[in-house]
Amino acid sequence: MKNFWTPFIRLILALGIAIMLGFLFVPLLSVFVSMTPGELFKKLNTQVSYQALYLSLGTTLIALAIIILCGTPVAYWLAKSHFWGNRFVRVLIQMPIVSPPAVAGVGLLLVFGRVGWLGSTLSFSGLSFSFNLQAVIMAQVFISAPFYISSAMQAFETIDDKFLAVSRTLGVSRWQTFWRVTIPLASGGLLTGAALSWGRALGEFGATMMFAGNLPGKTQTLPLAIYTAMQSDSKTAIAMSALLLFISFVLLLLVVLVGRMSHLRQDAKKKEGDSDAIISF
């Protein structure tokens, strides 16, 4: 009886795995095989495509710079401090990940919209943060910052405090220790978080639509351009989707390579067992 059920169970598991992998991979693959390379480049060679691509790359790079500059201190503070409410702050930071993007857009409108809590006050000074380029960047930062902060926190938490203590005993300032010891040791996690955050910002749709609108050449990023093209020219939408998927694949490949290099470097450091070598890194 046992010999009968074992092959049957294995067959069921194999079918389940095949169905799940097919469900995940076939729709993505269909985007690339639906058009010839010539058709793909022809559909992408339009003003709308170029505008959406440039807008997406430009705004996401600015958003990523803001996330790294502001998110790194936040991640380090949460990783190395043990104040009351630390876990609560971590949960709040994760909220944009689990919240629907449309909800994020509504929240941004309530605060920074023309009649929002801060937007109505700032509008008197001529500042506007909704339905413009600034709104696109703000939506991207809001949605994608948690990915970087979470990865950076994990990277900082894996650093043994004894390395930082040794650096301090040698007369190195806290600022120098942070740049010469902490950042190099956490670089793998920081780069991984940056890539994940950038990828999420590139794919942002809901919050951008709600808070920045879908204005071609002004606030229309690639995801919004795909949505618009699907209503009139599905081939162009497919071409843009293929481009966005390719960029996402490159970013994901970067995450894997950086993670691998980080593990190899950490293993080498452990084998050396020499904290002085780390300080002179």
Image (spheres, rainbow, N blue to C red):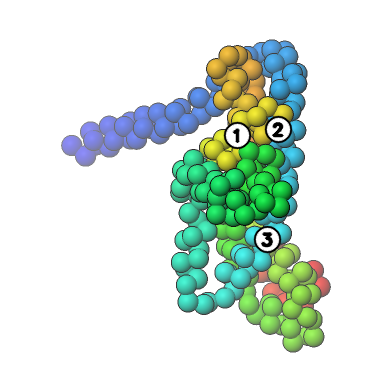
Identify the mark nearer the N-term, 2 or 1: 1
Type of amino acid at the residue the image marks with label 1: Gly
Residue closer to the observer: 113 or 125: 125
Quick check: marks 3 and 2 in contact, CB under 8 Å? Answer: no
Type of amino acid at the residue the image marks with label 3: Cys
Residue hosting label 3: 70
In the displayed structure, would residue 278 be above or below residue 152? below
Give the Cα distance between marks 3 and 1. 26 Å
Which residue lies at the image location 50% right of the left edge and 25% below the top edge?
26
Q: Quadrant of the C terminus?
A: bottom right
Identify the mark nearer the N-term, 3 or 2: 3
Whether residue 122 is visible, yes or no, is yes
Residue 88 percent location from the top left of the image: 46, 66
Give the Cα distance between marks 3 and 2. 26 Å
| Label 2: few (<14), some (14–19) or many (≥20) C-alpha neighbours in 10 Å | some
Residue hosting label 1: 213
Residue closer to the observer: 220 or 192: 220
Quick check: marks 2 and 1 in contact, CB under 8 Å? Answer: yes
Residue 268 percent location from the top left of the image: 70, 64
Which residue lies at the image location 72% right of the left edge and 29% below the top edge?
217
Mark nearer the viewer, 3 or 1: 1
Type of amino acid at the residue the image marks with label 2: Lys
Residue hosting label 2: 218
